[in-house]
Image (cartoon, rainbow, N blue to C red):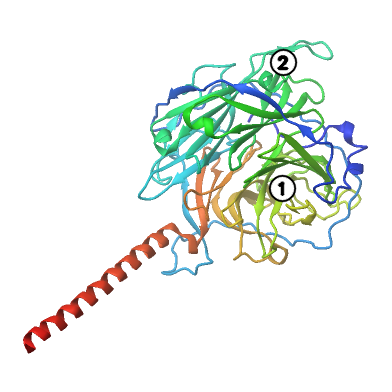
Amino acid sequence: MRRSRLHFCLTGMLATIAVSLCACGHKKEEGQPSPAQQKAMPQGHQVHATFTPTPPPTPGPQVPEHGTPPPLPTGPLVPAPTKKIPNSKGGVVPTNDAKPAQDPPGDFAFFKNNDVSDANASFSQTDEPSLGARDNPGGSQAILYTGNWYAGVSTDQGGSFQYMNPYTTFPASANGFCCDQRAMYEPSHDMYFWLLQYNTTGGCDQSNPPNCNGNNIYRIAVANGTAGVANGNWCYYDFTPQDLGMPAGLQFDYPHATLSSNFFYFTANGYLSRSTAGSDWRQSSVVRIPLDPLVSCGGYTYNFLNVTDHYDFNLAHGATDTVYWASLNNTSSIRIYHWAENSGTIFWNDKNVSSWARASSTCNDPKGVDWCGRAGVGGSSGTGWSNAVLNNEGTASVGFMWNAAACTDTSKCALNRPWPYIRVVRFKQSSLDEIDEPDIWNSSYAFEFPGVGVDSRGHLGGAMFWGGGSNYPTLVAFIWDDFSCDPFNCGWENYGAAGSSASDGNWGDYLDSRPHSPDAKTWVASGYSFDGTNVKPRFMWFGRQRDNPAVQSSGGGTIALITFLGLLALWMLFSMRRDRRNVLR
């Protein structure tokens, strides 16, 4: 991304009514249901990608992405919860990789923690990396890893990558490939997804309001299995804003994507084709695509919802039969949407949360560079989860995270947060009643740009950055599972993956985390570091030692060996007794 993402929020016209809608206590006491629209998509187009051993060169001057989000209203002051979370300490990259001979089962481990490319490759400082991985040692394996402006595939557990050029892999469309990409793997249908954002063809005149024309596309590419990805065989479908009922002159930007048991979802923010004074955002959309027809590159019927009163739909990961997403109403209220797989109707609830401030704040590094600049005044880089089961609570949770601005003025915010931080709110999935607000913060530096995933146990794992003050940004992996100390006692558990020796004002805008496949009790995540010259994308595969695939594999081999030796000993004993009887005869 070339422009700043400032908020995921609601337009100012809702400021006066947002809190009055927050009295929903049980999920059945919902706001006005919204029926999804429906359209047909013809069969996809097939393309074969070619690979190179190095990433594509950094493109020349880019067509700027447009889009100024709507202002986030300031909500009424909602007090802090009784239960308050302490500082989280940023994880440090270890200087010695040596491990004890035998780690306890609850020890955290990076199973892989590799740079994605060689040291001299050139990448955007707004890397926005994403990934999808099926990485089965001894079996089929492929990792799809995307960022600005590249796409890589690894077939050796992230040890090395071959590269596709997103500018030339697919046929030309709109005004050419732009920037944002999302990648993920869907295990039940053995499919990889690759979403690409293209530049707009249009523009606007100088009238007020402006007359605009043209559009751009999101290209949704699908590959069947690791063989499809490794061999570069893709099927793709193109969505224009008009395919979602938007008028001409709008363009898509800043996609989110997720999966449920039977559907793929993506979101889009619709902006005017030219930046204007104030906000040029006009519409937010969410799209649902059935998985089954994609296996054969077939046509399908898709459903979608458009709204003009809420900005930036932030999808929750880990969905099964119901998908959740959120948008901020104001600085003390959040709207949570939910859409069941067997329904064409979307429901929503508005929920109060403790007040946080919409304000300018910085997180300058040791050289005075504000690496949080693209986080703006807070509300950006939203992510979330569903079906998480933590701390023996006995109930699933849905939750959301987003960047928040520093605030120490208790007339504007409920909690003292002297540095930018990650706002976190959890709700009971059954009722959407709030559980708690386990923010990720520190009094001496910032936490920003979270990406979270849910493993098969319902535990959380992800990636984020911390830094500022005397610290350059550090990429860390975080985890919250049955071995974790309760964050309300210890802060969030996180571990350093890659440190930087410099930072940049274009840092951001998002990271991604997914459950590994087939080892779904572990996570894969994206990230990067910066040495002042080169951006270094990072592939991480992490979890607990109890789920270490190498330990599990050797354990299986040990069991097989013990079984074999036991049978051999029984056979030898039987033979000895038989020979003894023969001698006695």
The single residue placed furthest to the bottom in the displayed view is 584
Dot 2 amino acid type: Gly
Picture layout, residue 258 above or below residue 138? above
Residue 108, image x and y in percent? 53, 61
Dot 1 amino acid type: Phe
Left or right of 576, for residue 326: right
The single residue placed furthest to the front in the displayed view is 585
Task: Check residue 249 in the rendering and tell me which mark sits there, or answer none.
Answer: 2
Decide which of 291, 462 is in the foreground and name it: 291
Quadrant including the C terminus: bottom left
Instruction: Name which quarter of the figure residue 380 lies in.
Output: top right
Instruction: Name which quarter of the figure residue 549 lies in.
Output: bottom left
Q: Residue under label 1, please give it.
A: 400
Left or right of 333, for residue 467: left
Residue 521, image x and y in percent? 53, 56
**Label 1 element class:** strand
**Label 2 element class:** loop
Mark 1 packing: few (<14 Cα in 10 Å), some, or many (20+)?
many
Query: CA–CA distance between discs 2 and 1?
Result: 32 Å
